[in-house]
Image: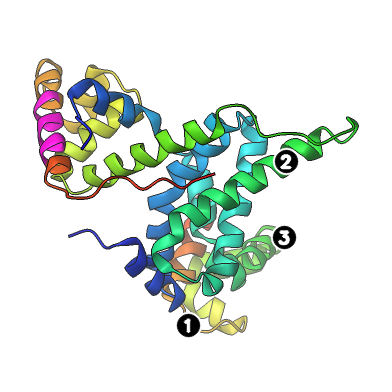
């Protein structure tokens, strides 16, 4: 069994710095992207009325646009709109 | 009790978005470190590899034969994509481009570092936070003190106490870190 003295632990903890937050977030959103998040964000950028409707009522606007009720998607769209 | 890799993968297979977020969180440092430390990719290339690794992992997770083998599987996938990136950047040069020297040793160290990091997650959250900020994020005592609302003069002793707890946690484990292999 390896002797994990303080110096060894310090070296090993330093060896794994956090990946950039934006990279991690993008990877975490892969399931949402596959379900259409990228298209929604793109349309919200291009279509002001759609964007305002999303800001006003994200959930209903997504349902009207043909997306099934999906709390994770709703939350992700809200995050993108506020960023 | 921290969920095992196999349990986490099993939840991902069921389409659990929270499980996928957790999986990315658990292995993001590892994939990142392979790209930038073992293969020394520039940041932009490392980002492409990082996203492609997780995109392919998401796509191919149902094909994984052994759920507990997710870490070596990700390591192999990252290695292959890093090498593809290096080869694509050197298209004009004839001949096979070998892996950089020392990749196996670096990944072995990263395997052990991940093992220690997993043990860290079993510690109280204040210890996780303070050790991660100091060692992995390279924050100063002052910044840590400000962020955690602690006197800067107590940070060194808190780090030392948390390292003792981490050592005890590791000594309490009967396993040794498995290597991803070459």
Neighbours of disc 3 within 10 Å: few (<14), some (14-19), many (20+): few
Residue where numbered disc 2 is placed: B85
Please say if the residues under marks 3 and 2 sit with CB atoms less than 8 Å apart.
no
Q: Is residue B153 left or right of residue B32?
A: left
The answer as to whether the residues below labels 3 and 2 share one chain is no
Neighbours of disc 1 within 10 Å: few (<14), some (14-19), many (20+): few
Q: Is residue B41 positioned above or below B121 on the image?
A: above
Q: Which mark is residue B94?
A: none
- B100 or A12, which lies in front? B100
Counting from the top left corner in percent of width and height, residue B5 is at: 35, 61
Counting from the top left corner in percent of width and height, residue A45 is at: 67, 58
Q: Chain of mark 2?
A: B
Magenta residues, as a range?
Answer: B160-168
Residue where numbered disc 3 is placed: A46
Q: Chain of mark 1?
A: A
Q: Is residue B42 left or right of residue B158?
A: right
Counting residues from the N terminus, which is met first, the one under dot 1 or under dot 3?
3
- In the picture, which quadrant includes the N terminus of chain B? bottom left
Helix or strand or loop: what does disc 1 sit on? loop
Q: Residue at x 59, y 73 (%)?
A: A35
Q: CA distance from mark 3 to mark 2?
A: 33 Å
Q: Chain of mark 3?
A: A
Helix or strand or loop: what does disc 3 sit on? helix
């Amino acid at each position: 069994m390896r002797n994990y003295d303080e110096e060894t632990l310090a070296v090993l903890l330093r060896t794994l710095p956090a990946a950039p937050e934006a990279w991690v977030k993008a990877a975490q959103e892969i399931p949402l992207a596959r379900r259409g998040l990228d298209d929604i964000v793109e349309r919200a950028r291009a279509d002001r009325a759609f964007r305002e409707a999303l800001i006003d009522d994200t959930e209903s606007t997504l349902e009207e646009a043909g997306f099934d009720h999906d709390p994770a998607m709703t939350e992700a769209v809200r995050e993108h709109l506020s960023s | 009790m921290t969920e095992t890799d196999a349990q986490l993968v099993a939840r991902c297979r069921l389409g659990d978005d929270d499980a996928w977020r957790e999986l990315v969180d658990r292995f993001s440092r590892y994939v990142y470190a392979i790209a930038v430390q073992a293969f020394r990719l520039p940041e932009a290339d490392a980002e492409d590899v990082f996203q492609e690794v997780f995109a392919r992992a998401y796509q191919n997770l149902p094909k994984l034969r052994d759920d507990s083998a997710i870490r070596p599987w990700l390591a192999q996938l990252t290695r292959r994509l890093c090498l593809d990136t290096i080869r694509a950047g050197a298209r004009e040069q004839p001949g096979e481009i070998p892996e950089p020297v020392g990749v196996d040793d670096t990944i072995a160290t990263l395997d052990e570092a991940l093992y220690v990091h997993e043990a860290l997650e079993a510690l109280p959250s204040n210890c996780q936070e303070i050790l991660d900020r100091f060692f992995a994020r390279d924050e100063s005592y002052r910044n840590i003190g400000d962020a955690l609302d602690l006197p800067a003069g107590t940070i060194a002793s808190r780090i030392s106490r948390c390292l003792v707890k981490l050592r005890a946690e590791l000594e309490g484990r009967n396993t040794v870190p498995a290597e991803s292999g070459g």
